[in-house]
Image (spheres, grey):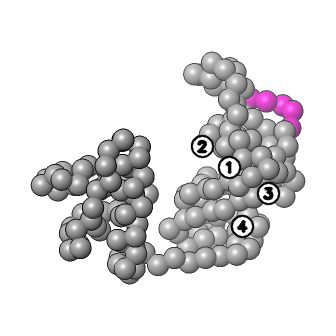
Amino acid sequence: MDSELFGHEKGAFTGAVSAKPGLVEAADRGTLFLDEIGDMDPPIQAKLLKVIEERRFRRVGETRERHADVRVIAATHHTLLQRMRDGLFREDLYYRIAVLPMRTPALRFRSGDIPMLARRILTRLALELGRPEAVLSPRPNRCSWRIRGRATCASCGTNSSAPCWA
């Protein structure tokens, strides 16, 4: 995760055959989306806090500091306040990222959103695969509840009689 977020220099670890910028560097003067920030290890939380507060970071294996101006949007399924109380999430980082908290109910509580999400996923997949756009059945099926960020359900095919998760 360290290398993915902050990048690394050639030879920083086994397999680092060339220097690679990380996500923080790539998001400079833009937005960095961090999914599942509640699972982030404490040492990486400290480095992320430095990016947010001081706009500075170091690639793995590097001694000089780099600068990055990023806006951070974070998501998690955890209750960060509880993780903070349990000592698993830094309090200072919590207060830096909890500026505008947004709680979104699980999709199982928003079944009315499923057709819109499914249409969007099918449209995107049709473009990516160069195929005609599929038409959704007006009757929901068991596949509807499997829609996730990677569109696992929709990518298995719409004309298939096999269950999407087989």
Tell which circle, 1 or 3, labels the residue nearer the N-terminal end. 1
Amino acid type shown at disc 3: Ile
Indicate left or right for 41 with 157 as reference: right
- Mark 4 near mark 2, Cβ–Cβ under 8 Å? no
- Residue 29: image location, x then y, percent: 79, 50
Mark 4–mark 3 distance (CA, rounded to whole Å): 9 Å
Give the overall secondary structure of the magenta segment: loop
- Mark 1 near mark 4, Cβ–Cβ under 8 Å? no
Residue at 36 percent of width and 72 percent of height: 114
Q: Secondary structure at mark 3?
A: helix
Q: Secondary structure at mark 1?
A: helix
Tell which circle, 1 or 4, labels the residue nearer the N-terminal end. 1
How would you rate the neighbour count of disc 4 (Cα within 10 Å): few for under 14, some for 14-19, many for 20 or more? some
Mark 1–mark 3 distance (CA, rounded to whole Å): 12 Å
**Which of the labelled discs sits on residue 97, or is there none?**
4
Mark 1–mark 4 distance (CA, rounded to whole Å): 15 Å
Provide the residue designation for mark 1: 44
Given residues 70 and 81, the one toward you in this image is 70
- Residue 142: image location, x then y, percent: 21, 67
Indicate left or right for 113 with 4 as reference: left
- Can you say whether 66 is above or below 145 in the image? above
Residue at 29 percent of width and 68 percent of height: 145
Q: What span is colored magenta in the figure?
A: 61-65
- Mark 4 near mark 3, Cβ–Cβ under 8 Å? yes
On whether residue 141 falls in the magenta region, the answer is no
